[in-house]
């Protein structure tokens, strides 16, 4: 993502946060708890919290993303004349192969103290009284299917048909649609024919009109979405399954940017599912929810980085121990410390986000709820029972720079190829900056090296010249202990 696009994203995200603080979002589905439904465990309900008005749920196929979306659709009575409410029996029905029973769904809403409960104790669904009205829009994966594959559209394709009526999108919607798809559209409309009331999306470019029968799946799905966004009332709930389906990366990013903007302008809540890092990168940490299935439960991890979310659904071979930490700086320190121990093991470090995310994952590891041995490591300035703390009592940058300075910057001339007087002066100057996270960047700018090269070099020197071997061994053993892997198993 370009720097200016990231700045625009941060600005929009901060505007939404401000709108939340000022009460602009008067209606929010704040959480859903699901028990004994489509793989969600029977013994204890699994709770998913929605902490931001535009939220993305990521996870492998079969982890329950679509189940959450459809349960959310049932949290309210449908508002709007002629629109039917979504019912759990429509989504979660009995079949010849499946029996849905002893199910409980609890929906907590910002506008009322009592939650909405949806239960099926035996053969009939029961919804608690007090389900409030709200406009609900559900866009499922059928929106990306070709029209000629959908029932009822065969009659529309006959050459004898003529357009009977149409609804044209507003100029703003057409421009926004063109921006997302990187195309120039002169018009966009939905038309019905003389022998069918089924509507077909039509896009117009300089060479003429072309219908959804000849549009790409991404074009057709985006056109349908923009029709919804143009119509959607304030304070609605918009649910989108597989938002990234059939869209290239640039279009995915721009679509999410548009959803953020519409959410702020209209106060709507958006919950979507995805498998795309491009989608996750466009939203803040509190808007990301990872569902991870493990044996008899589904882990819910809020606020993880896009990189960790995607690694969790990737097919990869796990190392001896997976270590979760807050950022790349900590990851470099962890790898260097373990490698320097007398009994090193294969460790893979994952920067997963904030301190709270590391704690979540460390607790899951401590309970044996992850499918691989893992440990959480936090900065030396923090402590937590399930985690190992890095050596030192401060932030990683402060610990490394301070300890090396106390040793008079050992071997920096040799490692960086710059005479000692100049290199030490640059390092001392960087430490005068107020934001310690900028120190490696400041040094890198002065010596024309990347901040990552600077940090890797300094951490290597720190481990070699400043950390006692006993501290290294203790740290390595603590990581092994927290992961519940014995030395013999490695």
Image (cartoon, rainbow, N blue to C red):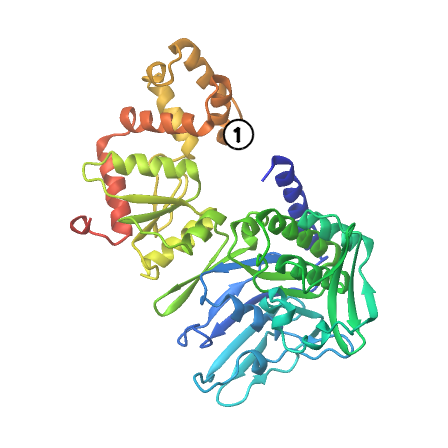
- Residue bearing the label numbered 1: 435
| Vertical comparison of 100 with 185: above or below | below
Looking at the image, which residue sits at the far bottom? 123
Q: Where is residue 428 drawn, in percent x and y? A: 45, 17
In this picture, residue 282 sits left or right of residue 367: right
Residue at position x 40%, y 12% in the image: 418
Residue at position x 37%, y 53% in the image: 362
Residue at position x 40%, y 25% in the image: 401
Nearest the eye: 153 or 362: 153
Residue at position x 39%, y 45% in the image: 350
| Vertical comparison of 83 with 31: above or below | below
Q: Secondary structure at mark 1?
A: loop
Give the image quarter of residue 475: top left
Image quarter where the N terminus lies is: top right
Give the image quarter of residue 215: bottom right
| Vertical comparison of 214 with 346: above or below | below
Nearest the eye: 225 or 106: 225
Q: Where is residue 349 drawn, in percent x and y? A: 36, 44
Q: Where is residue 16 drawn, in percent x and y? A: 68, 51
Q: Where is residue 191 drawn, in percent x and y? A: 78, 68
Nearest the eye: 345 or 410: 345
In this picture, residue 347 sits left or right of residue 267: left
């Amino acid at each position: 993502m370009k720097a200016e696009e990231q700045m625009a994203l941060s600005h929009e995200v901060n505007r939404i946060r401000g709108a939340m603080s000022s009460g602009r979002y008067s209606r929010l589905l704040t959480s859903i708890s699901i028990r004994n439904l489509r793989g969600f465990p029977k013994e204890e309900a699994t709770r998913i919290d929605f902490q931001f008005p535009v939220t993305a749920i990521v996870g492998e196929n079969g982890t329950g993303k679509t189940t959450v979306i459809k349960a959310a659709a049932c949290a309210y009575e449908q508002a709007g004349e002629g629109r039917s409410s979504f019912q759990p029996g429509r989504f979660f029905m009995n079949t010849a192969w499946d029996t849905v029973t002893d199910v409980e769904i609890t929906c907590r809403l910002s506008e009322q103290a009592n939650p909405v409960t949806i239960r099926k104790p035996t053969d009939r669904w029961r919804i608690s009284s007090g389900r409030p009205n709200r406009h609900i829009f559900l866009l499922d994966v059928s929106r990306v299917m070709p029209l000629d594959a959908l029932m009822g559209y065969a009659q529309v394709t006959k050459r004898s048909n003529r357009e009977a009526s149409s609804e044209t999108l507003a100029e703003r919607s057409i421009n926004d649609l063109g921006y997302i798809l990187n195309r120039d559209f002169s018009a966009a409309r939905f038309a019905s024919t003389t022998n069918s009331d089924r509507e077909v999306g039509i896009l117009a470019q300089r060479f003429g009109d072309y219908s959804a029968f000849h549009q790409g799946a991404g074009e057709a799905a985006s056109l349908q979405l923009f029709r919804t966004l143009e119509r959607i009332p304030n304070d609605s709930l918009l649910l989108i399954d597989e938002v990234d389906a059939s869209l290239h990366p640039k279009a995915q990013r721009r679509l999410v940017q548009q959803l953020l903007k519409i959410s702020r302008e209209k106060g709507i809540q958006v919950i979507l599912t995805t498998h795309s890092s491009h989608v996750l990168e466009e939203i803040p940490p509190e808007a990301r929810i990872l569902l991870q299935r493990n044996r008899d439960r589904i882990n819910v991890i809020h606020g993880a980085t896009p990189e960790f979310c995607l690694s969790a659904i990737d097919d990869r071979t796990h190392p001896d121990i997976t270590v979760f930490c807050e950022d790349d700086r900590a990851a470099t320190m962890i790898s260097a410390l373990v490698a320097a121990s007398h009994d090193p093991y294969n460790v893979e470090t994952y920067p997963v986000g904030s301190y709270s995310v590391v704690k979540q994952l460390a607790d899951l590891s401590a309970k044996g709820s992850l499918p691989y041995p893992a440990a959480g490591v936090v900065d030396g300035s923090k402590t937590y029972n399930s985690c190992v703390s890095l050596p030192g009592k401060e932030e990683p940058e402060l610990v490394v720079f301070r300890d090396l300075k106390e040793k008079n910057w050992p071997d920096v001339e040799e490692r960086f190829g710059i005479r000692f007087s100049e290199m030490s002066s640059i390092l001392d100057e960087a430490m005068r900056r107020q934001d310690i996270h900028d120190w490696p960047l400041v040094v890198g700018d002065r010596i024309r090296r990347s901040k990552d090269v600077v940090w890797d070099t300094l951490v290597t020197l720190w481990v070699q010249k400043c950390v006692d071997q006993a501290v290294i061994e203790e740290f390595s053993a603590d990581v092994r202990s927290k992961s519940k892997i014995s030395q013999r198993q490695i």
